[in-house]
Amino acid sequence: MALGNGAIGCSIPLLIAMWSGIAGAQTTAFTATYTGQGPGAATCNASFSIDGVKPSAAGSYPVFLYFVGTTETFNNASATAVIDGMAALGFVAATVEYDSGEFGGCAQISGKSSCAFNPQSSTSAISQVCAEAGADCSKGVVVGGFSQGAVIATLAKNFNSEVQAVWGMGDGVSYTQLFNLSSCLADGNRTLPSDRLRAVNGVNDEFTGDTESKQQTNMQSLTGFQCAAGSISCLQRNGSGWIIVQTGQTESGVADHCYMRDGGCFASQNSLDSDWKSGTADWELGANLEWLARFVTGHSRDPRNR
């Protein structure tokens, strides 16, 4: 049975403590490159950059990868905030560049995901990050992304069994009238089970559904989780499911495709909604990173440890 906002998730004191710890966390930056799918290609043929951050303390850590949206810079403000947050939670975390200038159908975007997540290729993004000192992918890999990056993330387990959970912003099976990704992205048509997927979209998302009803239809197709018409949250007992961000929840009153920015998609990609960055609501950054962290070995909130 689906539960509404606040039914699961970490407590407010826990989130406050978590985000208070980020500022003081000791982390180390790293960079790498990998071979991804270049413009117009159908193979892994082009070099792309990886920017990462990890705990400075000696140890072995699970891995997190993040992918920005179409035309975005791979190390923009939201990507940096995400990987800094995951490093503070004890992850080797990286934002991965890819050919973000093109958006395509299932074959094209699956190719990008395969180049990033193929564990059999020493030049894939996941192999490069897993080879980083301190990284231990056997503890689990979790993934996040925005827009096209969310699609790449949602498809990641098709190519890598170590992927445990995915958080997608602006995620969906339909992007405008041009791209129907149901054949590879809808519930049941991909390897990632829906109880390991959390999608968070704006109510006026101009790409995945610009009304609440359209958005709900899209997210129900993506996750398979059905809630009553007009629901703005359909989270399950373990926190998987979907959330529709409302205009009144954002700093600027804009809940479009880029709700994490202060002003939506017309704002700079380096201008973040302050509540999204540091708030404690289920749609905001902290709660989603903490949800991802549950699914790696040894995390105190791992459902397998309950």
Image: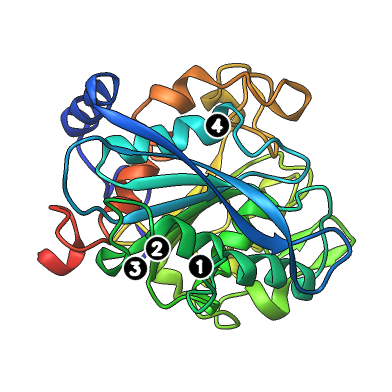
Q: Which amino acid does label 2 sit on?
A: Ala
Pointer 2 or 1: first along the chain = 2
Q: Where is residue 43 in the image (x, y as percent from the top left)?
A: 76, 73
Tell me the crowding category of disc 4: few under 14, some 14 to 19, or many 20 or more residues within 10 angstroms, Cα based: many
Specify the quadrant of the image occupied by residue 82. top left
Residue drawn at point x = 71 percent, y = 39 percent: 204
Pointer 4 or 2: first along the chain = 4
What is the distance, in whole Å, between disc 4 and disc 2 at their CAs? 19 Å
Secondary structure under the numbered disc 2 in the rendered image: strand
Tell me the crowding category of disc 1: few under 14, some 14 to 19, or many 20 or more residues within 10 angstroms, Cα based: some
1 sits left or right of 270 in the view: left
What is the distance, in whole Å, between disc 4 and disc 1 at their CAs? 30 Å
**Residue 29 appears in view:** yes
Residue labelled with disc 2: 165
Q: Are marks 4 and 2 in contact (CB under 8 Å)?
A: no
Residue drawn at point x = 54 percent, y = 75 percent: 121
Nearer the observer, 276 or 160:
160
Pointer 4 or 3: first along the chain = 3
Residue labelled with disc 1: 226
Q: Do the residues labelled 4 and 1 touch (CB within 8 Å)?
A: no
Q: Is residue 233 above or below residue 120?
A: above
Residue drawn at point x = 25 percent, y = 53 percent: 61
Residue labelled with disc 4: 78
What is the distance, in whole Å, between disc 4 and disc 3 at their CAs? 32 Å
Q: Where is residue 256 in the image (x, y as percent from the top left)?
A: 70, 35
| Labels 3, 2: front one | 2
Give the quadrant of the C terminus: bottom left
Q: What residue type is labelled 3?
A: Met
189 sits left or right of 61 in the view: right
Residue labelled with disc 3: 1
